[in-house]
Image (cartoon, grey):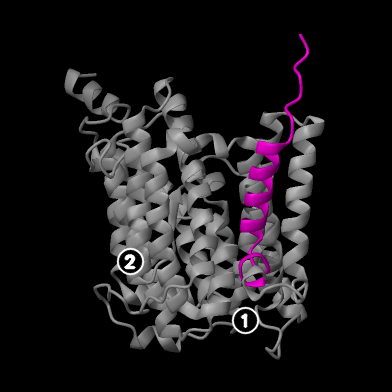
């Protein structure tokens, strides 16, 4: 083997080397298939809750792909500490935001969501700047409780989609919907649990493809909107004119703050897994600010917020491939997808039972991530009390619309429909107030 060949092969495992494109492209596509599902399903679920038109759904999917692509490219090629971590990470749509996004659009529509996302992203950027001073508020007992609650609060969304998505639809709850959902779910399970390599990493995407094919063969897909969609379209800023509502901003702002802490954890996991060191302050600050800037842009363009993709962190730590060319190619692929309305129009035709069957495992993994975070903290009597009470209040209160009927209106507006606000505030307060347990010597 020549010195040049060796250098090309080794380049995949260096930040700034020049790897062979033939080797870089498959590795980039592996990252794309691992993160792209969120960029498709997240805006579609939010659009369904908002009741927007199919044309607006296409805009939301496009915008979500575009801001994710920008975030990926920023993290790969930006200036360390300034809008970039310069760590080998992928960025996609953040499922942790979904329950709060859904709640906001049901109350205030897409305009209210756009305003809350712009303001909340600014709050997330502030966390990136001052994370060292406020990090004590978000130990694993708090973030674990929040993540567990987010996962649990999404279960009804997935099951509702498996049944058909809308209770007023004539086919809602039909055997056909459930068969389609189960075909998708079984495919995800088989690919994820029995597959290896790229098949295992892209199990959710494979499940969606099989479910989509099954729906197409049975005539369950409406292709009429694809023909009218254009081939190339630039984003339209402020398509959804932002409106700012205090309780929506606070609700989503808390999620942005928690997500910033989660991003910090993913950046640290990457630095530890690849470089065997802690992420430094510039990497964390730049990474968090860069992601939140792209989320702010998402509020302007109509896309959903972004977050560092944990599944891709796992791929990086396993393969040790850190070359920025790989991540640059992945970002360009996602960018091109976001500029092609016809592709987004195809994605919007995915039947709701297929979405439900594909995402229920994702939502389950979110909840279990919260459990693992709590377990790492140690399931002591104090921590189980804090987590148990926080999650119980957060899951229970929003299920009863009139629970604050006799209270001032602002209490119901802020706490009545947001699991995240309840679990975060409860866990933070209990963690600060309750006495620490004495460690045995």
* Callout 2: SS: helix
Residue drawn 66% across and 65% down? 415
Q: Residue furthest front?
A: 408
Image side of residue 190 versus residue 256, left or right: right
Residue corresponding to mark 2? 338
Image vertical order of residue 156 relative to residue 70, above or below: below
**Magenta highlight on residue 439:** yes
Between marks 2 and 1 in the image, the one whose residue lies nearer the viewer? 2
Q: Is residue 249 above or below residue 348?
A: above
Q: Residue 374 appears in which quarter of the rendering?
A: top right
State which region is magenta: 412-441
Question: On the rendered image, what quadrant is the C terminus found in?
Answer: top right
Task: State the residue at coordinates (54%, 68%).
Answer: 247
Q: Is residue 52 left or right of residue 338?
A: right
> Which one is nearer the viewer's eye here, 163 or 98?
98
Residue 424 lies in the magenta-colored region: yes
Q: Is residue 431 above or below residue 222?
A: above
Residue 424 placement, left or right of 8? right
Q: Nearer the viewer, residue 141 or 40?
A: 141
Residue 418 position in % (x across, y down) = 63, 64
Distance, label 2 to label 1, CA atoms, is 29 Å
Q: Is residue 193 above or below residue 223?
A: above
Image location (x, y in percent) of residue 358: 61, 61
Badge 1 density bin: few <14, some 14–19, many ≥20, Cα 10 Å:
few
Question: Could you tell me if the residues under marks 2 and 1 are in contact, i.e. CB atoms within 8 Å?
Answer: no
**Residue sitting farthest toward the right:** 381
User: Residue sitting at 74 percent across and 72 percent down?
Assistant: 404
């Amino acid at each position: 083997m020549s010195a040049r060949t060796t250098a090309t092969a080794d380049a995949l495992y260096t930040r700034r080397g020049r790897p062979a494109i033939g080797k870089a492209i498959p590795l980039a596509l592996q990252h794309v298939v691992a993160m792209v599902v969120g960029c498709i399903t997240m805006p579609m679920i939010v659009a369904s809750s908002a009741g927007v038109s199919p044309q607006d759904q296409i805009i939301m999917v496009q915008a979500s792909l575009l801001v994710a692509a920008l975030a990926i490219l920023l993290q790969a090629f930006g200036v360390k500490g300034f809008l970039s971590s310069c760590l080998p990470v992928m960025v996609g749509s953040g499922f942790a935001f979904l329950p709060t996004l859904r709640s906001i659009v049901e109350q205030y529509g897409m305009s209210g969501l756009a305003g809350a996302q712009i303001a909340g992203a600014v709050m997330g950027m502030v966390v990136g700047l001052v994370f060292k001073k406020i990090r004590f508020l978000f130990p694993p007992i708090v973030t674990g409780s929040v993540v567990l609650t987010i996962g649990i609060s999404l279960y009804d969304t997935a099951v509702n989609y498996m049944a058909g998505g809308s209770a007023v639809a004539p086919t809602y709850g039909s055997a056909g919907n459930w068969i389609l959902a189960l075909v998708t779910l079984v495919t995800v399970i088989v690919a994820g649990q029995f597959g290896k390599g790229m098949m295992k990493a892209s199990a959710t995407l494979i499940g969606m493809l099989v479910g989509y094919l099954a729906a197409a063969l049975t005539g369950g897909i409406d292709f009429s909107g694809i023909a009218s969609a254009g081939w190339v379209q630039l984003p339209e800023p402020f398509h959804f004119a932002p409106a700012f509502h205090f309780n929506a901003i606070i609700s989503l702002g808390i999620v942005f703050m928690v997500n910033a802490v989660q991003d910090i954890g993913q950046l640290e996991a990457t630095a530890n897994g690849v470089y065997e060191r802690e992420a430094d302050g510039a990497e964390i600050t730049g990474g968090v600010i860069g992601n939140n800037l792209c989320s702010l842009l998402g509020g302007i363009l109509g896309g959903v917020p972004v977050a560092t993709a944990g599944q891709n962190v796992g791929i990086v730590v396993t393969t040790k491939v850190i070359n920025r060319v790989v991540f640059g190619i992945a970002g360009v692929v996602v960018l091109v997808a976001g500029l092609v309305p016809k592709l987004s129009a195809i994605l919007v035709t995915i039947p709701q039972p297929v979405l439900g069957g594909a995402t229920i495992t994702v939502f389950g993994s979110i909840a279990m991530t919260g459990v693992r975070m709590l377990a790492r903290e140690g399931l002591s009597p104090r921590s189980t009390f804090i987590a148990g009470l926080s999650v119980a209040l957060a899951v229970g209160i929003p299920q009863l619309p009139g629970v604050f009927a006799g209270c001032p209106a602002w209490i119901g507006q802020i706490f009545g429909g947001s699991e995240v606000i309840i679990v975060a505030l409860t866990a933070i307060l209990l963690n600060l107030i309750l006495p620490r347990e004495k460690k045995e010597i």
